[in-house]
Amino acid sequence: MQTETITMKADLQEKLGKRPIIISGPCSAETEAQVLETATKLAKTGRVDILRAGIWKPRTKPGMFEGIGVKGLPWMAQAKKITGLPITVEVATAKHVEDALQFDVDMLWIGARTTVNPFSVQEVCDALRGVDIPVLIKNPINPDLELWSGGIERLQKAGVKQVGMIHRGFSNYGNTEFRNAPMWHLPIEMKRRFPEMLLICDPSHICGSRALLQTIAQKSIDLDFDGLMIESHIDPDNAWSDAKQQVTPERLAEMLDSLIWRFENTDQKEFLTALATLREQINHIDDELLTLLGQRMKIADKIGVYKRDNNITILQTNRWNDILGRAISKGDKLGLSKDFITKYFDAVHLESINHQNKIMNE
Ligand code: PEP
Ligand code: MN
């Protein structure tokens, strides 16, 4: 038993050194047959390095399937025995860690809903003290890099030697094309902070549906991620959790086959990463500018109400000259031409006037 465990650990080391690392398996372990059949088919693709399954599932609403629990661990151990592949499960409490270790789980991961809570991360870390097992930590649900970094630091302080990161996107309000927005500049910043650390992309939880998986997987590869974690199920439509985003082992193999892995040229890699970082920064700044412009117009609306109630004209030439003069001189210091500032402020001013006109005539 002892030797077997040591051999498997050595195997995992080899896998963790490989690029790209592919982790796959069902969102949740459901039945013994489902785990074993999925694992066997995934192993048969020859593309999967580590098997995953959720044993304890943090679900948004009570009454949803909350994981099969400890009962699923022997199924995973059996899957490892049959396929020879190392296994990984999500842990959120000290008891989860203890149970997983009992069944020779080779690697652990901390889920997004756990990373947000320093109490939980610390509890997991305390349970890991003195245990030699790699741990991957997913980004927190909210776009807070300090929380993600903090989780990594807690693991390192607890003596975990191999820590890796999983990018699974960030929760945002309302409907967007993603279940969790990728916000690529955030994992890129983590890569800058922890350049030697394994960085895996989880397109399944970013996309929330099968349609975009391939695009997101490719994008992460182009950004020099070290591998992928993709959920796979023998009967995705009837999965007990995350049915829309899982793919069959066959489809997974097809997808992995058509991805283009870019490593050859380091210059190109650095170029792509730098370009993506800068573009994300521009997107971010543009978003902020638009938000601020929206806020500016709301204030103009309020002024419009005062002007209307006090019978004052919309256009007050002195005030406008004052604004423009200030902007041109500030713009000059920031390297912005007079021509640009004048055009930009004319457009902003016109929009303000239109807003106030509407209020005057309501
Ligand atoms: C999962 O991997 O099945 C999972 C629960 O993911 P996340 O923590 O990213 O929501
Ligand atoms: Mn899932």
Image: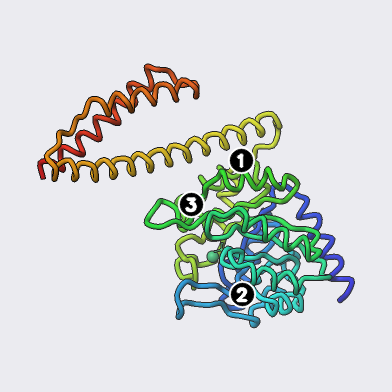
First-in-chain label (1 vs 2): 2
Residue 223: mark:
1
The residue beneath circle 2 is 55
Residue 252 appears in the rendering:
no
Label 1 within 8 A of ligand 1 by Cβ = no
Q: Is residue 94 left or right of residue 310?
A: right
Q: Is residue 122 left or right of residue 168?
A: right
Disc 2 marks a residue whose amino acid type is: Ile
Return the residue nearer the eye: 336 or 217.
336
Q: How is the image coloured?
A: rainbow
Question: Alpha-carbon distance for marks 1 and 2?
Answer: 31 Å
Look at the numbered discs 1 and 2 and tell me whether their residues touch, using CB distance below 8 Å: no
Around disc 2, counting alpha carbons within 10 Å, would you say few (fewer than 14), some (14 to 19), or many (20 or more)? many
Around disc 1, counting alpha carbons within 10 Å, would you say few (fewer than 14), some (14 to 19), or many (20 or more)? many
Question: Alpha-carbon distance for marks 3 and 2?
Answer: 25 Å
Return the residue nearer the eye: 198 or 191.
191
**Where residue 54 sits: x, y (%)?**
60, 70
Look at the numbered discs 3 and 1 and tell me whether their residues touch, using CB distance below 8 Å: no
Quadrant holding the C terminus: top left
Question: Quadrant location of ligand 1?
Answer: bottom right
- View extreme (right): residue: 3
